[in-house]
Image (cartoon, grey):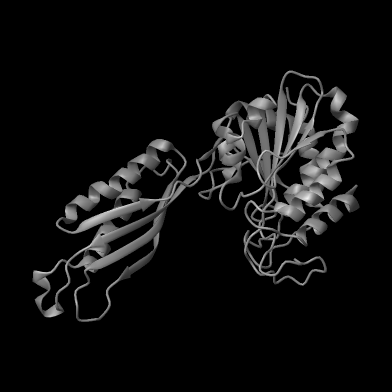
Amino acid sequence: MFSTIQGFRRDLHQIPELELHLPKTKEYLIRRLQSLPCMLSSPIESSVLAYFDNGKASTIAFRSDMDALPIEEKTAVTYHSQHPGQMHACGHDGHMAMLLGLALRLPQILASLPHNILLIFQPGEENPGGARLLCESGFLERFHVRRIYGMHLWPQLPAGVIASRPGEMMARSSEVNIDIQGKSVHAASYGDGIDALEIACRYLCDLYAMERAIDPAQYRLLRFGVLHAGTIRNVVSDHARLEGTLRACQEAVFAHMKNELTHIAERYAPARFSFSFSEGYPALINDPALFQQAKDLLPQLICLEGPQLITEDFSWYLQHVPGVFFFLGTGTGIPLHSDHFDFDEHILMQGIEALVTLCYST
C-alpha cells in the first residue's frame, strides 16, 4: 500500500497548479477514483467530490486541498515540479494522496460504517478560498453532511504525530491598509504642516499598545510590516501608508481591534485616515464534542496548547457543519511555503489510518 500512496504523492507533486484552474490535477484524481464504487461530481471548477453511498441518512466528509503555490522549486528530488514557477510547497500533494488512500480502503469497510462517506478534493485553498465557493454550491446539504474532518502536514511536529485541540485552532485574518493624509511643507516650517510620517509612527505605537492590553488568553495579532511615507528628506510628508495584518480567534476580539483602529485615529485630527480591510477567512474553531470523540478513537492524538495565528479556509465548512482539523507532523522543520519543502511519505500512512478510524465515529 505504501508504494501506491507514495506514487500518488509523487505524481501529484510533478503537476502543481494554481488557484481554481487545476485541469491536470482533476484529471489525475478522477482517473484514480473512477474504478471505485463512488459517485463523482464537480460542483465548482476543478473540484472533485467522491461520494460513497452506504444507504445511511447522514454523511461524514473528509477534505483535501488541491492547489499549489507560485514558487520555483529548489529541491533536488527526482519527482520535482514539471511546471516552472509552481510547486506543491504546502503539502497539498500529500493531503490528496492520503484521501486517495482512504478511498482505496473504503470499499472493504463501507458496509460496516454508520454513515455515508464523502471525499472532498478542493481547489483554491491558498487563493481565492475554494471552500467558500464549494459551500455556496449547496453540496453539504445535497449529500446530508453532518460533520467534516481535515488534516494538514505540519513541519513543527515530530514525524507522524497527529495533533489538534478543541475550540480555537486557527485565526480569522484580514489584511489591513491604512492611508494617512497630512499637509506638506518645508521641514523648516514643519509647524505649518501636518506630518503624516510622524503621525503614522505615533499611531502605530498606539495600536501596538492597544493590542498588548488585551488579555493574553485572547489569541490575537496586530502587526504592520510596511510603512511608506515621504519623497525627500527636508519636506514634511503629506501622506503615509501602513500595511499589516489583523488576526484573532474570537469574533469579539477581532471586532474590538478593528474598531480601535478607527477610534485611535480620531486622536490625530485634522489628519485624515482611510482604511481598507480584506475579508479573509473565518477563524477555524474545532467542535469540542467531536474533538473529544476523535481523542477517544485516536489515543495517539496530541492536544495542542494553543492555536496557530495563521489561516485556513477549512474554516468555511465549519460555518455550516461541525468538524475537526488536524495537524500531521513531518518532523523536518522545513517551513510550509518553502522552496525546499519536502517530507518522508511514510507519515502519510499514519494519516490514512487516522482517517479510516474516524470513519467509524458515530
Query: Could you tell me residue 201's position as x and y percent?
Result: 27, 64
Residue 166 picture location, percent across and down: 58, 34
Number of marks: 0
Vertical position of residue 136 compared to residue 12: above or below? above
Q: Is residue 210 above or below residue 218?
A: below
Up-down: is 216 above or below 268?
Answer: above
Q: Quadrant of the C terminus?
A: top right
139 displayed left or right of 8: left
Residue closest to the far top: 57
Q: Is residue 160 visible?
A: no
192 left or right of 214? left
Residue 148 percent location from the top left of the image: 66, 33
User: Residue drawn 81% across and 39% down?
Assistant: 102
- In terms of image quadrants, where is residue 226? bottom left
What residue appears at the point 8 percent right and 70 percent down from the top-left corner? 192
Residue 136, image x and y in percent?
A: 57, 35
Q: Quadrant of residue 214?
A: top left
Q: Is residue 236 visible?
A: yes
Q: Quadrant of residue 193?
A: bottom left
Q: Nearer the viewer, residue 23 or 168?
A: 23
Which residue is drawn at the image coordinates 87% and 29% (left, top)? 109
Q: Residue at x 50, y 49 (%)?
A: 309
297, 325: nearer the viewer: 325
